[in-house]
């Protein structure tokens, strides 16, 4: 009788261990980014963690590349101002590049995170996509079929677009006005960098050094 009771208790212990292991495995399993629902879930989890590197990695390649170029140009312009501008002109020239957290962001993902935080504070753009991506999914459809383009309709009523890229993964597409903003910043980053370079040439020219002070 005692031996039977011990056997039952052992089986229960093994069953409990298996259930705990299974539950732990489910919690640690990452969303499958080869599916639109997985990408949506990955974004929601990353946002809960405040992990903007993960959010940045979910963006479509073209947008990531644009943000990386903007970040590089802003950092280079900032460096040139710090090393080549007259002291009296540095503060304003740096401010023209953008807020300090934005221009000093260490990585493209950090730059994107600062843009998101500014957009949330100003409530004038939707770069954070908080409202669009925070709700549960209602429907997901591929439109048109076979295109790799997906339309997600969350319970919030906002529409989210996803796109399957050559890596086989489904990536996030920012809202149209966000794409427009990123496109403008992309162009402006080249214009600002060129203006800074031209300014430094002017400061270093013989005429500039010998010109009388007004």
Image (cartoon, rainbow, N blue to C red):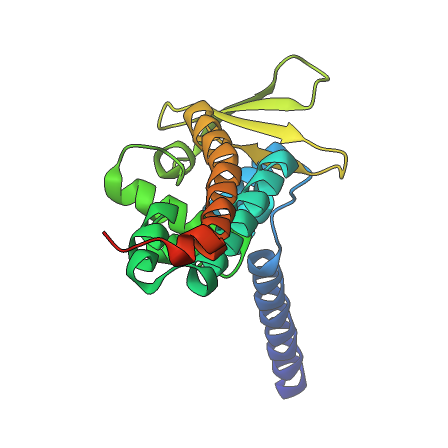
Q: Residue furthest left?
A: 214
User: In the rendering, at what x and y percent does residue 67 appear?
Assistant: 54, 43
The correct choice, above or below, for 185 with respect to 205 in the image is: above
Q: Residue furthest top?
A: 144
**Is residue 172 toward the left or the right of residue 105 in the image?**
right
> Can residue 110 be seen in the rendering of this structure?
no
Q: Nearer the viewer, residue 1 or 192?
A: 192
Q: Quadrant of residue 151?
A: top right
**Is residue 28 toward the left or the right of residue 118 in the image?**
right
Q: Nearer the viewer, residue 207 or 15?
A: 207
User: In the rendering, at what x and y percent does residue 29 appear?
Assistant: 62, 56
The correct choice, above or below, for 164 with respect to 106 in the image is: above
> Can residue 172 be seen in the rendering of this structure?
yes
The residue that appears at 42% across and 25% down in the rendered structure is 177
**Is residue 146 toward the left or the right of residue 137 in the image?**
right
User: In the rendering, at what x and y percent does residue 34 appear?
Assistant: 69, 39
The correct choice, above or below, for 211 with respect to 6 in the image is: above
Q: Nearer the viewer, residue 137 or 34?
A: 34
User: In the rendering, at what x and y percent does residue 57 appear?
Assistant: 59, 48
The residue that appears at 50% across and 45% down in the rendered structure is 198
């Amino acid at each position: 009788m005692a031996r039977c009771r011990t056997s039952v208790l052992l089986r229960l212990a093994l069953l409990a261990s298996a259930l705990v292991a299974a539950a732990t495995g489910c919690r640690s399993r990452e969303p499958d980014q080869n599916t639109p629902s997985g990408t949506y879930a990955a974004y929601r989890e990353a946002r809960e963690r405040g992990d903007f590197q993960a959010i940045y990695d979910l963006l479509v390649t073209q947008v990531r590349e644009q943000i990386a170029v903007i970040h590089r140009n802003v950092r280079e312009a900032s460096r040139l101002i710090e090393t080549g501008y007259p002291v009296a002109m540095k503060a304003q020239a740096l401010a023209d590049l953008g807020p300090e957290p934005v221009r000093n962001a260490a990585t493209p993902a950090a730059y994107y995170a600062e843009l998101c935080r500014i957009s949330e504070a100003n409530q004038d753009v939707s770069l954070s996509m908080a409202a669009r991506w925070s709700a549960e999914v209602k429907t997901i459809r591929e439109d048109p079929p076979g295109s790799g383009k997906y339309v997600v309709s969350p319970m919030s009523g906002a529409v989210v677009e996803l796109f399957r890229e050559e890596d086989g993964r489904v990536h996030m597409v920012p809202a149209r006005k966000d794409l427009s903003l990123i496109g403008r910043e992309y162009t402006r980053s080249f214009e600002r960098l060129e203006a800074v370079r031209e300014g430094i040439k002017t400061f270093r020219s013989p005429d500039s050094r010998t010109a009388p002070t007004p």
